[in-house]
Structure formats: structure tokens, C-alpha cells
Image: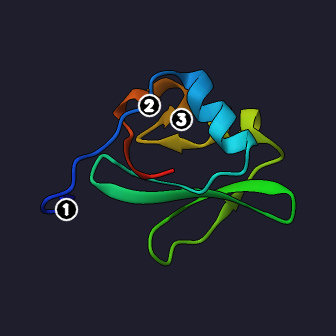
Amino acid sequence: MTIPGKDFDKLESLDELIEAIDMGLDIEFILYGIRYNISWRDYKPFICTCPNGDAVFYADTRDMISHHKVNGKPLEDIWQDFEILAM
């Protein structure tokens, strides 16, 4: 996926991602050509594809980054590939 005229931001570390999720920031990013959103609802973090994907809820941030997989890899192993649109 490309967005004409849009430069993407990159995360500096896994800790930056964890802190952003824990603070409750809405994180919108592209990963391997698919647009995603990480946010919170009912005191639990979730991830979904944009714009109308089903939310997958997790107990906490660590649970999400360890267990949510894209292309067979957990988020904690592929955070460097996130193309951040908004955070």
C-alpha cells in the first residue's frame, strides 16, 4: 500500500511501541502493505485492519505484542517494519 505524498515514521525501539500502547495512543500503521490500527476499548488493547476489520482483543500490551502474529511472526519481532501513519 502506498499513500502518495505521505512519508512514514518509524519506531525507534520496541519499548517505544510498548509505551505508546500502554499510554492508550491510537496507532495507525502499514505493515506489509496492510493498514492496521492499535487502540483500546473496555480497558483492553486491540488490533484490527483498517478501515473495517474485526478487532482482536488482548489482556494487555505484552500479550498483544507476544501473541498477535502477522505472516507467522509476533509483533515484537517485526515492529521495525511498521510504517507509522499516526500515533
Kindly identify the residue that appears in the image at 34 percent across and 57 percent down.
34
Kindly identify the residue that appears in the image at 86 percent across and 65 percent down.
42
**Residue 3 — which label?**
1
Q: What secondary structure is found at the residue carrying circle 2?
A: loop
Among all residues in the image, which is located at the extreme left?
4
* Left or right: residue 32 compared with residue 73: left
Tell which circle, 3 or 1, labels the residue nearer the N-terminal end.
Answer: 1
Q: Quick one: label 2, few (<14), some, or many (20+) residues within 10 Å? A: some
Whether residue 61 is situated above or below residue 5 in the rendered picture: above
Q: Amino acid at mark 1?
A: Ile
Q: Amino acid at mark 3?
A: Leu
Kindly identify the residue that appears in the image at 67 percent across and 43 percent down.
21
Tell which circle, 2 or 3, labels the residue nearer the N-terminal end.
Answer: 2
Whether residue 29 is situated above or below residue 22 in the rendered picture: below
On the image, which quarter does residue 81 sit in? Answer: top left
Residue hosting label 3:
75
Residue hosting label 2:
11
- In percent of width and height, residue 67 lies at 66, 37
- In percent of width and height, residue 41 lies at 78, 65
* Left or right: residue 33 compared with residue 68: left
Whether residue 60 is situated above or below residue 38 in the rendered picture: above
Whether residue 69 is situated above or below residue 54 in the rendered picture: above
Front-lying residue, 23 or 64: 23
Q: Are marks 3 and 1 in contact (CB under 8 Å)?
A: no
Per the model, the C-alpha gap separating discs 1 and 2 is 19 Å
